[in-house]
Amino acid sequence: MLSLYNTQTRTVDQVTTQSDGSVAIYCCGPTVYRDAHVGNMRTFLLGDLVTRAIRATGKNVKIIQNITDVGHMSEDLNEDKMLLQSQAESIDPFAVARKYEEKFHGDLALLNIESAQSYPRASESIELMHALISQLISQGNAYVGDDKSVYFSAQSFESYGAISGNRLDALKPGHRYEFTEGGAKRFHADWALWKFAGTRTKMIWDSPWGPGFPGWHIECSAMSLHFLGPKINVHIGGIDLRFPHHENERAQTNSITGGESVDLWLHGEHLLFEGRKMSKSAGNVVLVSDLLERGIDPLSLRLCFLENRYRSQMDLSWDSIKAAQVTIKRWRKKLQEWGPDAPILQDQEILKAVMTDLDMPRVISRLRVVEKDSEISPIEKVGIFKYAEQLIALDLLRGEIAAELPQEAHELLAAREIARSEKNWKLSDELREKLENFGLEIKDLPQSQEWQWR
């Protein structure tokens, strides 16, 4: 069975199963107020890899991924991210949510990330949250604050901090959206389960405690319990969710079930881009659509992710993405040459690597060895690649599909023709560099220029 690094136990643990032998997975999904960037996609790929690995053992998987479309507050402004984007785009907040939710599903498809069984929306799960909050209040785990909001009492949950290592007696205010309620809370580390609407007029619902909206953390507790029940085998998210989101979610859920509801907490590490954290202010946020604009197969990004351990920080670059595209093109071409009709051939080295904490870099290294090994017949090579394809999903058997040249690239080529005819070599070189950023290789002839995809 698959073994993964459990953030809570700090050990590599075997994935558990339900009583029927299936595996229940909950994967924290996007907050749909903007496009998901490639760092987000790395985390979502983790859920796909876990699912494919478990299915390779013959077990069924039920994976649920939520859609956060309300309640995720901005740390700097303490306002709902959906409402802030609604104001920026001058459209209804739910229209914002559906717009970026659709884009999210489109990006998943481009990266061959299989769909979850269900994508419950927070805005459509309000009654589930009300039921949980009412139970937490009746048990003494939650209370109504002086500001009419409902808070979870962190001190009521004895093992708080087991995932992140944070102790309540040492925890100081730090996450602004968790600590803005002043004297309304009994303890500074308590967090809101239900926020009283106050002057807010959009994205609010009636509740037993007055009009308001849910806190971010209660959403995942409500949806995971409803769709997967009291026992979740694997809970997946980015490392940034370890605290406070997953810590708070664990406290809420376990208080409801009376036991440890999640067997294994799995976290993917941060992604840097060309040495820096991706941020809007730095201007280095990269989207899947940016790859398409440069004429790059999005599965090149998937290969880049596979070449790095999921729990190691990764530094992505355009050069690494382009190199991955070259590899994919070569493999597709060779599989066609070797004969794509060969039967699947299970490879024990690949299987062991995958089952040992998703060691995907070892899988890719194994494929590189198989490709070059003259003692392995072409039929065997195809069989091994086919076996790996079930796990890596790079569409290696489809053959190469020529990418359409973007309109901007056509315009740059035309401008460069003019620059060369005018002997403006400086501009010509500048335009060549821009064209190369699209993934083109330019060859200058005496009277013309030619291009091809790298």
Image (spheres, rainbow, N blue to C red):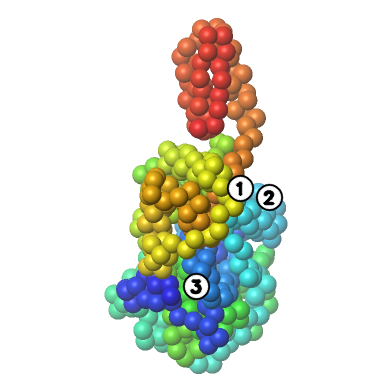
- The front one of 398 and 231 is 398
- The residue at the point 62 percent across, 55 percent down is 109
Q: Secondary structure at mark 3?
A: loop
- The residue at the point 55 percent across, 64 percent down is 29
Q: Position of residue 172 (x, y in %)?
A: 33, 70
Residue at the spot of label 3: 57
Q: Amino acid at mark 3?
A: Thr
CB contact under 8 Å: marks 2 and 3 = no
Which residue is at the far bottom? 139
Q: Could you give the CA–CA distance between mark 1 and mark 3, rounded to whole angstroms?
A: 25 Å
Q: Could you give the CA–CA distance between mark 1 and mark 2, rounded to whole angstroms?
A: 43 Å
Q: Position of residue 369 (x, y in %)?
A: 38, 49
Number of the label disc, if any, that sits on residue 398: 1
Question: Which picture quadrant has residue 83?
Answer: bottom right
Q: Position of residue 167 (x, y in %)?
A: 31, 77
- The front one of 95 and 239 is 239
Number of the label disc, if any, that sits on residue 90: 2
> Label 3: few (<14), some or many (≥20) within 10 Å?
few
